Amino acid sequence: METRMGIESRPLSGKEAATAEGLANRSSCRPKVLLTSICRPIGPAHGDGASVGYEVLHGQVTRAQGVFSPRSVNYTFALDYIAANLDAPTVVLQYPSHRELVRELRKGADYVGISFNLVTFHRMKEAVALVRKHAPAAKIVLGGYGTVLDDAELAPYGDHICREEGVAWFRALLGEPPRPLPYDHPLVTLQLRVFSIPMDRTGMIFAGLGCPNGCDFCSTSHFFKRRHIRLLPTGDDIFRVIERYLEIDPRMSMAILDEDFLLAKDRAMRLRELVLERGTPLSIFAFASVKALSRFTPQELLETGVDGVWVGFEGKRSGYAKQQGKAVEELIPELRSHGITVLSSMILGFDYQTPEVVREELAEFLALRPTYAQFLIYGPTPGTPFFERIMKEQRLNVNLPEDAERYYRACDGFSSMVRHSSMTAGEIEALQQECFEADFRLNGPSILRSVEVWFEGWKRYRDSISPYMRAKAARWADEIRRAYPVFRVAKRSGPAPEAAARLEEEVRASLGPPSMGPRLLSWLAPAAAAWTGFTLRHDYFQHPKLVRRSYRTSPWALRSGELGSLRVRTERALRSTLVRIEGALDTASARRLAAGILAHLRGNDAEVKVVVAEGTRAEPKDVRVLAQKLAPLRHRISIVVPSHRDVWAILKSA
């Protein structure tokens, strides 16, 4: 789902260490950093692989569902994560056009980081060419899963290659001191649209990287050498991020990005304790394996906030260790019956498969009625055991070994790259399309399957003895009512109108007719769906606008760090920022802290909460300086002082 700038710390090379030492000595001038994704437009219509695009759901999961496909742009999250944890002024560009990237390059940057995947290698080359032309003095850093390629392949395009934990690596390169985990967590939200209408927002939680399961095809697992790195080490760390998102929107959904989140059971169970203590029903989507899910009851998952999971079905005889535990034929229906949506993935092209075997497995898979279904072709990626085996057996399809860039573009999950004993490449790719079409035709739109699963959860838990589960049932009921407009379109143009009508009738009988808002949207929904179909057919409005974020680009930017003897740590939300201070406040640090807070509040409606740690020292005159400087915007600043207020009472009462 995401593109990262690497993991795993190691000493910098001699060249990199010399650069870092030189930068450390330039204390009066921090280097400027620009981090960018590849440039738009991208996609099959623009010469890219079949699954290349801005959206995981629409591009790789609901691609055959037309207007019923939920839409949400996925960004290169690692760029914001790294930027939030550097001291240097940093700008992040998400999907710039060539012109927008050039405009930013002309502002000057000492380092330009470009994140790419193997399948977008050619797009990385385009960005590098623009950097070399318009910012020739800038050093280019290559990162992301595309860096599985060796130095000989990448050296012509990058001055530095980041194949490690991005924050620690970049800080070392820039001569910045190490930071302990957990790092500062940027708040990144995604907007979900159905029939082009904005629906829920999802807050992204970056909890970990890597996976110990080590499936032979998995680039993420082997990129990190089968290690799991907890970016948010404890359940408390995750819960703090959740609370910051809930501050933005009390009903915000969330997605935990961690390859097998539930495998760390201690962390998940601590999160469950905190969720139950708060009592607010959450909606969290997480990645999990059969092995990990088998260690939890469905109610325990719900009490952790998890009501949606992505779990691999893979293949009946694939034999991966992560599939040990409950039989998947039992697991998926059990989860659905408790209101937990399931996105499950099936792989085509295993050595044991024939067209008949694929269709048999597909029939069994679809009978489980996963809420969302993904079908990918078994493909060899450099750095994985499957790649090594295929290269040893010389089984790459003709022309791929000799044409490296053609091979890279084929690493999209939708191209058959391996000579198979019983199926041609064309047959495998045709079977994949058949799987997507059968899923939509037989099981209907995924957005209606979600409603069906929520309804099962509501029926099971509406009268639960658990206050939390009753509250969760109430949340499901609200989400179901908001989905009434989908029924109208599904009955008109869905693949199974009778099933949609039956589900709507049952929902109405249990929850009552829609209120005025959903009723109006129901009348508008067919027109919105028709508009969505028009934009899809003609490729209108299918490309996101540039998202540009700047970090610490103002000399008075509010940031974590040290102001003399005063230590400052910030945690940002969209509208509010927590500022924790400890150590010793003097006149200079009081002025600088106030300037940062005022600059942060200027020109927006944000708020700041200042927390003074126990034992923080200050003279009355210095606290008065801070109070006087903050006075113009004091109504937007809340202050928590130590239990022994002494001099800090001046700040509280100001």
Image: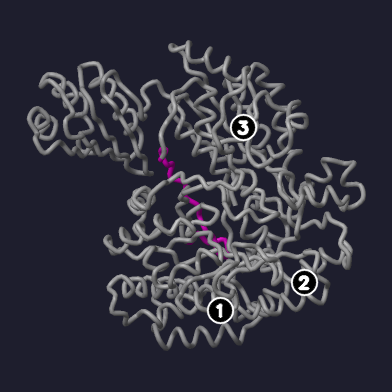
* Front residue of this view, candidates 322 and 118: 322
Q: Give the quadrant of residue 325.
A: bottom right
* Front residue of this view, candidates 88 and 40: 88
Q: Residue furthest right?
A: 398
Q: Amino acid at mark 1?
A: Glu
Q: Is residue 530 visible?
A: no
Residue 43 position in % (x across, y down): 72, 50
Instruction: Point out the frontmost of discs 1 and 3.
Output: 1
Instruction: Point out the frontmost of discs 2 and 3.
Output: 3
Q: Which badge, 1 or 3, is on the more N-terminal residue?
A: 3
Q: Is residue 54 left or right of residue 356?
A: left
Element marked by disc 3: loop
Packing grade of label 1 (10 A; few <14, some 14-19, many >=20) is few
Say which residue label 3 marks. Answer: 162
Q: Which badge, 2 or 3, is on the more N-terminal residue?
A: 3
**Is 88 part of what is drawn in magenta?**
no
Q: Amino acid at mark 2?
A: Glu
